[in-house]
Image (cartoon, rainbow, N blue to C red):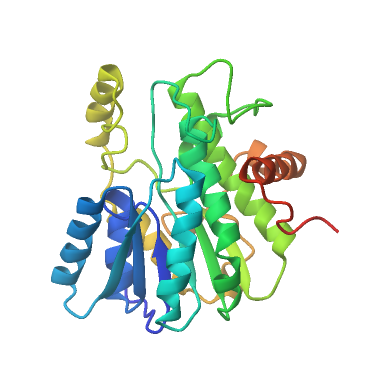
Amino acid sequence: MNASLTNKTALVTGATSGIGYQAALDLARAGAFVIGTGRDTARCQHARDAIREAVPNARVEFLCADFSSLQQVRDLAERVDRLLATENGRLDLLINNAGLYSSAKKITEDGIEMTFAVNHLAHFLLTHLLLPVLGRAPDGRVLTVSSNSHYQVFFLQSRPQNPRIYIGIWAYAVSKLSNVLFTAEFNRRVNVDNMHAWAIDPGLVNTEIGGKDGGFLSRLVWRSRQKMGTHAEVPSRTILHLASTPREEISSVLYWMNSNPKAPSRLSRDAGLARDLWELSCRLCRIEEYFPEN
């Protein structure tokens, strides 16, 4: 990875471990000013210090926020805006990466199922709130980490924010399908020269996402699978590729894996479904207008 991102600013959510940490590290190596996020103060400090040790000239800061709370997402956006004001006042790269898996149904303080709230809705809201600073960049890019699991969803229930029947792996797959639908609808609605979005398939990666769940069976299954996964450097290379490649070479492709185009699922290409999810997300986030249709 020889990309140069000098004078670029990047925000990476879920950057204290796994793909997010590796992406933050690689972006710092490429010369970007990096803002990472995490939900634990100690882990944020540890990640920041580790990146500064690995890259002595790194410009990196971390902000703490719990993505299960929409209010904390709003507070995070305000802190990002203040921090960017000390730089060039703009955000060139937004990497929506934070995510979780839960075998048990949990409801957030906003009344939303946890997996959908963290993996999709928080990033939907954060992207909306950061549009002003993204708009100041000559080439603002939004990269959202989805998953191969989105291919496993054959229909989207009418209430993904609070399904009557909850199955952990299905809820996770729905949230990852939502990432792709959001990316496609963002490009359709925004449709401006200086902003574009892409979705990324990281493949099976040896991270702790499945091991953090409270369920014994889930942890056991994940421990056996994660050993077959690649290092986080692999999806990070895709992030760096999309962050640095001239936009005219990549803008026609929505979904990427291993730095190459990949066809997303049939359902993720359903324009009506993407529109419905966008409007539902606006209602849940209490957004009156987020690039309304003409």
Q: Nearer the viewer, residue 143 or 246?
A: 143
Q: Residue furthest right?
A: 294
- Image quarter (top left, top right, bottom left or bottom right) of the C terminus: bottom right
Counting from the top left corner in percent of width and height, residue 140 is at: 55, 72
How many numbered discs sit on the rendered protein?
0
- The residue positioned 53% from the left and 43% from the top of the image is 120
- The residue positioned 58% from the left and 22% from the top of the image is 163
In the rendered view, does 216 fall on the left or right side of 118?
A: left
Q: Residue furthest top?
A: 165
**Could one spot residue 153 in this view of the protein?**
yes
Figure check: 85 above or below 77: below
In the rendered view, does 108 fall on the left or right side of 54?
A: right
- The residue positioned 54% from the left and 30% from the top of the image is 111
Counting from the top left corner in percent of width and height, residue 281 is at: 65, 43
Q: Nearer the viewer, residue 18 or 64?
A: 64
Counting from the top left corner in percent of width and height, residue 226 is at: 26, 35
- The residue positioned 17% from the left and 57% from the top of the image is 46
**Could one spot residue 256 in this view of the protein?**
no
Counting from the top left corner in percent of width and height, residue 292 is at: 78, 56
Figure check: 133 above or below 22: below
In the rendered view, does 104 fall on the left or right side of 111?
A: left
Q: Nearer the viewer, residue 70 or 235?
A: 70
- Image quarter (top left, top right, bottom left or bottom right) of the N terminus: bottom left
Figure check: 166 above or below 271: above
Q: Quadrant of residue 23?
A: bottom left
